[in-house]
Amino acid sequence: MNEDTVQTIIADLAEKGWCVLPDFMDPATVADLRTECLARHAAGGFHRAGVGAGRAEVVSEIRSDVILWLEPEDTHPAIRRYLAATEALRQRVNQEFFLGLNELESHFAVYSTGAGYKKHLDRFREDDRRALTAIVYLNDRWTEADGGQLRLWVEPSGEGESIDIQPTGGTLVTFLSELYWHEVQPAMRQRLALTGWFKRR
């Protein structure tokens, strides 16, 4: 992760509380992550995602993706590169904003045709450790007609103006988890992402 990338993320988070950064990950790494995501999906390792934290997590019609959690010790080379990039981001964000971020939890997410995720916040009412959301898209040659945009409300109220973000491969979307309402629009074809949250102690 080069210094220009870091400065763009830091500046946007300071000014707006969110950032959309194309080409955060290089095309070769994105392709390797996509291949690995699809291989693990085909092997049956994914499960239906729920909402809520810990014992309060329940499967809900709010979301219809399937997920596979990543382990910090995963040895796949592309996953190691993703973890290294997000670790560098964690350290720099901590230096700039003193958020006390000490770990990343992340998962592959696969949305089948027609799947989406209704409007929500990423910070749980019963667990406030998630501080910064970081989503990296893995999709190949995504077009506006494919749907699946991330709709982000730019005011913390969750009302008024919103922006629609294309889930283009390599793009990073990051925002303060407790403030920004968002939803995944229904996808017209399979949609892949690596979704992560930097957590406080």
Image: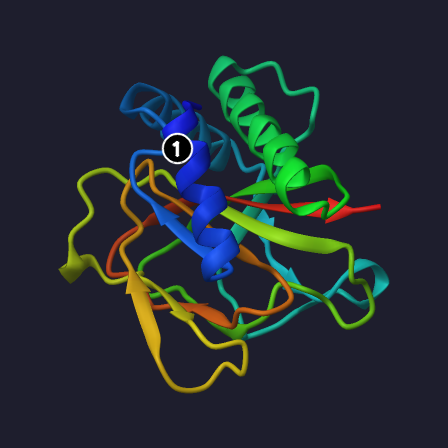
Q: Residues within 10 Å of mark 1 (few under 14, many from 20)?
A: some
Q: Is residue 98 left or right of residue 68?
A: right
Residue at figure coordinates x 72%, y 48% from the top left = 99
Looking at the image, what colour scheme do you see? Answer: rainbow
Vertical relation: 35 (above or below) 161: above
Residue 176 percent across, percent down from the top left: 58, 59
Type of the residue with mark 1 = Thr
The residue at the point 68 percent across, 64 percent down is: 123
Between residue 12 and residue 57, name the one nearer to us.
12
Reply above or below: 151 against 132. below
Q: Quadrant of residue 57 in the image?
A: bottom right
Nearest the camera: 143 or 123?
123
**Looking at this view, is 198 or 9 the one in front?**
9
Query: Image quarter for residue 39?
Result: top left
What residue appears at the point 72 percent right and 45 percent down from the top-left corner? 98
Asked which secondary structure carries label 1, the reply is helix
User: Whole-percent x and y of residue 120?
Assistant: 55, 73
Q: Residue 92 versus residue 172: which sits nearer the camera?
A: 92
* Residue 18, image x, y percentages: 47, 57
Left or right of residue 120, residue 7 in this image? left
Is residue 136 visible from the viewing direction of this image?
no
The residue wearing badge 1 is: 5
